[in-house]
């Protein structure tokens, strides 16, 4: 029996549903964590994974809109940016990021979107005595998670931030958004040179598949600098394994998930 067992065994016709949506979905671990937390608190909800492709997005959203016992949605790859366009109201942080990873369904059917990827990432750092305040960060990836992390790091008071993505226009958009909201922060996009930074953060999906290339050449890492990942499966990505061999401390993706749990559940009105 998994940690989610007590919640799954108590599902009734009155249970409110939360779906984690994505493609792929096998890497998702939030369902297990959130079911465990809510079961321990005696809350009659259940979190379940739901996989659909980007090509089926419109049909899937229409279906979700029709469910009367749907209480919330947690979008993951690749649906975060697109889900922002279908919610009825977007919270300021999500507007700045340009994506949502949490949607609350109000009693009247209104969908309200926010994002907690970045909050969770920073909370994970802080809870492990790695407060990013005053530190420099090289962020690889400017998608939904990367943009959220960039905003959260700026809010946490990092001294310098560089955002890098193979899609340079995407990286430039994130930099422009952060610069506009935090004009005192040194933020740019450019060459991924780990030696210039205290923290190297991977916010790309590279590492989920065994044949993926590294998001950054691990040989360029510097012993002692912190290397982090947002990927849940595998729990320790090839990048993090290589970083440890280079003498770098690491933070795994699950720590960011734990870091965002309370904030996300509070947004849902469950804690």
Image (spheres, rainbow, N blue to C red):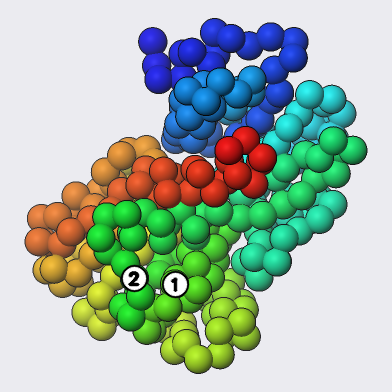
Position of 110 with respect to 91 (left or right) is right
Query: Is label 2 in a helix, a strand or a loop?
Result: loop
Towards the viewer: 92 or 204? 92
Residue 249 picture quarter: bottom left
The percent coordinates of residue 224 (x first, y second) are 13, 68
Q: Is residue 110 left or right of residue 9?
A: right
Q: In this view of the protein, which residue sits in the foreground, 228 or 207?
A: 228
124 and 66: which is toward the camera: 124
Q: Quarter holding the C terminus?
A: top right
Q: Position of residue 259 (x, y in %)?
A: 42, 49
Which residue corresponds to the image point at 71% horizontal and 23% vertical from the top-left?
A: 16
- Whole-angstrom CA distance, mark 1 to mark 2, is 7 Å
Q: Going from the N terminus, do you reach mark 1 or mark 2 first?
A: 2
Can residue 197 be spotted in the picture? Answer: yes
Classify mark 1: residues with Cα within 10 Å, few (<14), some (14-19) or many (20+): some
Q: Is residue 206 above or below residue 227?
A: above
Q: Please say if the residues under marks 1 and 2 sit with CB atoms less than 8 Å apart.
A: yes
Tell me if mark 2 has few (under 14), some (14-19) or many (20+) residues whose alpha carbon lies within 10 angstroms of its own: many
The disc at residue 120 is none
Residue 189 place in picture, x, y as percent: 46, 82
To which residue does mark 2 refer? 132
Left or right: 233 as drawn, with respect to 87 = left
Left or right of residue 120: residue 196: left
**Residue plotted at (55% across, 54% down):** 116
Q: Residue 67: where, in percent of width, then height?
A: 82, 26
Residue beneath the point at 34% across and 70% down: 132
In this figure, which residue is indicated by the disc labeled 1?
156
| Residue 38 position (above or below residue 134) | above
Per the image, label 1 sits on a secondary structure element best described as helix
Camera sees residue 176? no
């Amino acid at each position: 029996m998994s940690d989610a067992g007590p919640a799954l065994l108590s599902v009734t016709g009155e249970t409110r549903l939360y779906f984690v949506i994505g493609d792929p979905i096998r890497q998702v671990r939030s369902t297990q964590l959130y079911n465990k937390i809510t079961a321990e608190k005696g809350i009659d909800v259940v979190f379940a994974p739901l996989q659909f492709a980007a090509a089926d997005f419109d049909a899937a959203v229409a279906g979700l809109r029709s469910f009367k016992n749907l209480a919330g949605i947690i979008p993951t790859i690749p649906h975060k940016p697109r889900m922002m366009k279908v919610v009825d109201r977007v919270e300021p942080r999500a507007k700045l990021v340009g994506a949502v990873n949490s949607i609350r369904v109000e009693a009247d059917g209104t969908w309200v979107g926010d994002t907690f990827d970045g909050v969770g990432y920073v909370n994970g750092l802080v809870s492990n005595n790695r407060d990013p305040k005053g530190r420099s960060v090289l962020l690889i990836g400017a998608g939904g998670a990367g943009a959220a992390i960039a905003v959260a790091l700026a809010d946490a008071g990092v001294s310098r931030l560089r955002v890098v993505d193979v899609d340079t226009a995407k990286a430039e958009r994130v930099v422009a958004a952060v610069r506009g909201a935090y004009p005192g922060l040194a933020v740019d996009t450019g060459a991924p040179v780990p030696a210039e930074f205290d923290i190297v953060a991977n916010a790309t999906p590279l590492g989920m598949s065994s044949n993926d290339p590294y998001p950054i050449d691990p040989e360029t890492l510097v012993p002692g600098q912190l290397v982090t990942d947002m990927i849940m499966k595998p729990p320790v990505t090839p990048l993090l394994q290589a970083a440890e061999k280079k003498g770098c401390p690491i933070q795994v993706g699950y720590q960011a998930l734990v870091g965002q749990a309370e904030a996300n559940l509070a947004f849902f009105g469950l804690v």
